[in-house]
Amino acid sequence: MNKQKNIELKAELLSEGLWVTDKALSGIGTQYKEQNHGLFGWDFEDHVGIALPDDFVLQDGTIVQLRMNTRSSYWIDATGNGLVLLKGRRKIGPVEWLPRPAFYKRKTKSGREMVKIGQIGGADCLFFCYQNFCSHFARGKQCLFCNLVSTTVTYDSVLRKKDSEEIGEVAAAAFSEGQAKHVLLTGGCFDRQKEVDVLCTILDSIRRHTGFDTIPGTILPSPARNKDDLKAYHEAGIQAIGYSMEIWDEPLYRAICPGKSDSVSHDEFIDSIKTAIDIFGAGNVYAVFVMGLEPKKTFLEGVKAVTSIGANVVPFAWSPNPGSMLEGHRAPSSQWFLETILEAAEIVYDTAIPAGTENHCYRCDGNSLLHDALRLKGVE
């Protein structure tokens, strides 16, 4: 199967989900990496008490996030020759689970399980949600696609607030194993100045524990109010910064993200990205979008606009998650995702922004298609 076919397959698996036989689940949570719900629940249905894989790998190395849907025609089974992906009775090809990191078995000095503090996303991205909280939920103004709060309540599988020293301990353990190549840090929406202080303290801890001068990876904070805040992040040692714009089309942004749009305007995001590029450099700033919730035309307008000023793009492929306001809706077709992401890749490639793969790459997560599309052009 060629790489473009694998992108289409990945798009279909993200938009349709799949299910897994009991036999294929053998070793999940012991030998192979399991879901730990560090932020969102990406499955189509909840699965409390059942350990599911976080993601899996296609033959060409494409990482695919596992989104459980027992009504899907796609499924994974175990055979004498390993795991196989099927659609109905038709065999598509072999797949592999990802190995469980050794630090998942370890504890911090204070006795907390490391896996409840940080998790590996995809094959090599060390993920921390430093605070599983969003103030918009309290007012009923959460983003319509978000299930952060319900996921936290349903699974209760991670610490809701992480200690900065323990984050540093986990980072040291994960990087020393050699599996982690980048970090990704995010948190729910809360007071901006407090967030600056919290993040800088965490980054200092990671540097001290790992011995890094600069930390490979990305932070996703709220847009900073001034240039000094951005300088503080940069001086704290992180290599890249991103902003979760979610939706490019402004009326849709206000409708889908009522709380966020009340506090952060479209123009504020753009201003923050421009300022961040001055400090972090072209290619080291990202605009994060939820792909599939706005028309192809406006999504591509957003990709063109942010890349034209020197930023990269991370578009996560949307599916209707349980506990979100859009639960039960349908994502666009896999063909829509394929056509749209191939056009987006053309825009990004033609702009010739530094790829930034030292901070975020195709192995980092299985819920985005852009890195996979850029691989068709030799961008690894």
Image (tube, grey):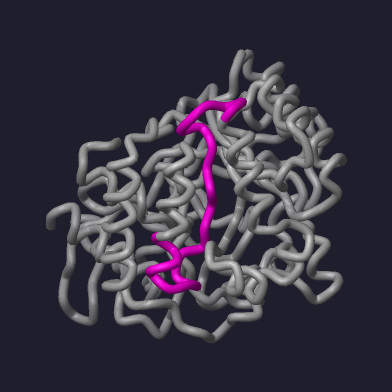
Taking 85 as reference, is 313 above or below it?
A: above
Residue in the picture at 61% in, 53% down: 244
Q: Is residue 296 magenta?
A: yes
- 347 is higher (above) or lower (below) than 232: below
User: Does the rendering let one see residue 51?
Assistant: no
Q: Observer-nearest residue: 325 or 64?
A: 325
> Residue lying farthest left?
1
Query: Which residue occupies 71% across, 64% down?
Result: 261
Quadrant in the rendering for residue 353: top left
Q: Name the image quarter holding the C terminus.
A: top left
- The reply to whether the magenta stretch includes residue 346 is no
Residue 161: x %, y % from top left: 81, 47
Q: Position of residue 348 (x, y in %)?
A: 34, 45
**Res. 130 visible in picture:** yes
Total of numbered circles in the picture? 0
Horizontal relation, residue 29 to residue 19: left or right: right
Q: Which residue is drawn at 51% across and 85% down?
A: 329
- Depth check, front residue: 191 or 298: 298
Residue found at x 28% / y 65%: 338
Q: Where is residue 298 in the image (x, y as percent from the top left)?
A: 44, 67
Q: Give above or below for 103 relative to 50.
A: above
Residue 91 percent across, percent down from the top left: 16, 70
Q: What stretch is highlighted in magenta?
A: 278-300
> Where 232 falls versus 346 (above or below)?
above
Between 55 and 299, the one lying in front of the other is 299
Is 142 placed left or right of 360 in the picture?
right
> Dividing the picture into quarters, in which one does residue 193 lie?
top right
**Image quarter in which the N terminus is found:** bottom left
Q: In which quarter of the image is residue 215?
A: top right
Left or right: 129 in relation to 360? right
